[in-house]
Image (tube, rainbow, N blue to C red):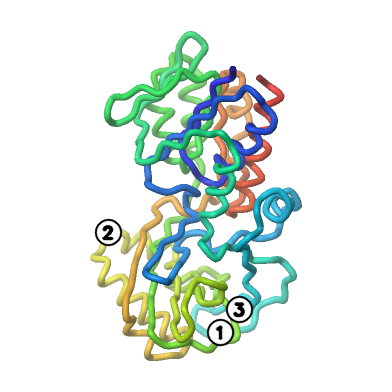
Amino acid sequence: MTRIGVVGAGGAAAAACYALDRTVPDAELTVVEKSGGVCGRAATRRRGPIRYEYGANYVKSADERVVELLTEHLDTDGLVDVAEPIWTFDREGEVSPGRESDEHKWSYRRGITQIAKRLFGATEAAVHRRTRIETLRRGDGVWTLVDDDGEEWGPFDVLLLNPPAPQTATLLADAEWDDPLRERLAEAVDAVPYRTIWTAVLGYEFALDRPYYALVNPGKDHGIGWIAREECKPGHVPDGESVLVVQASHEWSVERYDDPPERNVADLAAMTADVIGEDRLRAPDWSDHQGWRYALPEGRVAAGPLEDAADHGLYPLGDWVAGEARLHAALRNGLETGERIALAV
C-alpha cells in the first residue's frame, strides 16, 4: 500500500487525487484542508437561492486535457457555459467591446466548487476539513504531519503540498527535516510573487441589462480590475436580480486590505457605478466580501528544487507550480503531478 498525504484541497490537489486513484491501485489518499470547503480560490457561496463565485469566476476551455476531464470523465449534469462576452475598460473607466473568443467559460449551476467535489467524490480519498497543518516532519523515509491541535497524521510515503506558495514556503521553512534541500526549496517557493485581491460582492433587487458578462481592466491602471455579472451563469441568480463580483486592483487591495469592510464595499460600489454607468449600483441591497492575500501567482517556482524534492517523495503543486494563474492550469498540473507520482512509486 502506498500512503499518500495531501495538504490542501484545492483544484490541483483534487485532480492529483483523481489521477492517483486511477493509476496507483493500492494508494491510500488522505487530504487535510484548513477551511470548511474544497477547491481553494475557486470558491462558491450561497445566499438563499443565489449562488456566487467570489474567487475564480470560471474555468476556461484552454487546455485539452481539462476539457476532456470536465466533459467526458466527470458528470456533466449542471455544467453551464457563460455565453456573454468579456469587455474592457481603461484608466478613466471608459468601456470598450473586447475581442471575440470561442473559448468556453464554464461553471456549474451549484457553483464552481463542484469541480473539486466531483473529483474527490470519484476517488476513495479521505478528505478532512477544518484541519490546519502546522508542522511537516521527515524521518525514516516517511512524512508525518502535525495539526494545530497536536494530532499527528501519517506516516506518508508521498506528500503533496497544495497551499499557495507563501503558505507552502512557511511550512517548509518550519519543517522538521534535516536536509539542506529544505532551506533551498523553501527559498525557491517563497520567491514566487503574488497579487493580492480584495473582492466585494454586490447584490441588487433589479435586473441589470448590459451586453457583456464581465469587464476587465487590462492596463491594471484602475482601482478595479474586474467586474462580473453573476446572473449570466444559469442557475445562479433569480430573474429580476443582479449580483456583481467586483475585484479590486492589486495596489488598491494592498493599501486597503485591513480597512473596515463596509468602507471598502461602499467605495468599490461607487467605482463600479461609475464604470458601468448606473447610479443605482452605488447602494447595493446586500453585500459580501473576501480578501485574497495570495490571489494570483505572477511567476513559477524554480524547477531544480522541485525535481530534488520529488526524490524525497515531496510534490508541491498548484497554479504557482504551473506558472499560470488560471484554474485550468492548476487542474492540468494536478493531473500531471498525480501521473508523475504513479511512475515513481
Q: Nearer the observer, disc 3 or disc 1? A: 3
Assess disc 1: are there few (<14), some (14-19) or many (≥20) residues with their C-alpha within 10 Å of its C-alpha: some
Q: Which mark is residue 95?
A: 1
Q: How many numbered marks appear?
A: 3
Helix, strand or loop under label 1: strand
Q: Residue at x 57, y 29 (%)?
A: 315
**In the drawing, does residue 73 fall left or right of residue 211?**
right
User: Please, what is the three-letter code of the amino acid marked with disc 2?
Assistant: Asp
Question: Up-down: is 184 above or below 194?
Answer: above
Please provide percent x and percent y for residue 107.
58, 63
Whichever of callouts 2 and 1 sits on the residue coming sooner in the sequence is 1
C-beta proximity under 8 Å, tags 3 and 1: yes
Image coordinates for residue 57, horizontal then vertical, percent: 53, 64
Tell me the amino acid under the disc marked 3: Trp
Alpha carbon distance from label 3 to label 1 = 7 Å
Q: Earlier in the sequence, mark 2 or mark 3?
A: 3
Residue 250 percent across, percent down from the top left: 44, 61
Q: Which residue is mark 3?
A: 87
Label number found at residue 258? 2
Q: Secondary structure at mark 2?
A: loop
Q: Which residue does the image show at 70% across and 48% down from the upper left?
A: 73
Upstream in sequence: badge 3 or badge 1: 3
Amino acid type, label 1: Val
Front in this rendered view, residue 80 or 208? 80
**Do tag 2 and tag 1 residues touch (Cβ < 8 Å)?**
no
- Name the quarter where the C terminus is drawn: top right
Q: Quadrant of the N terminus?
A: top right
Q: Is residue 255 above or below residue 12?
A: below
**Residue 323 versus residue 54: which sits nearer the camera?**
54
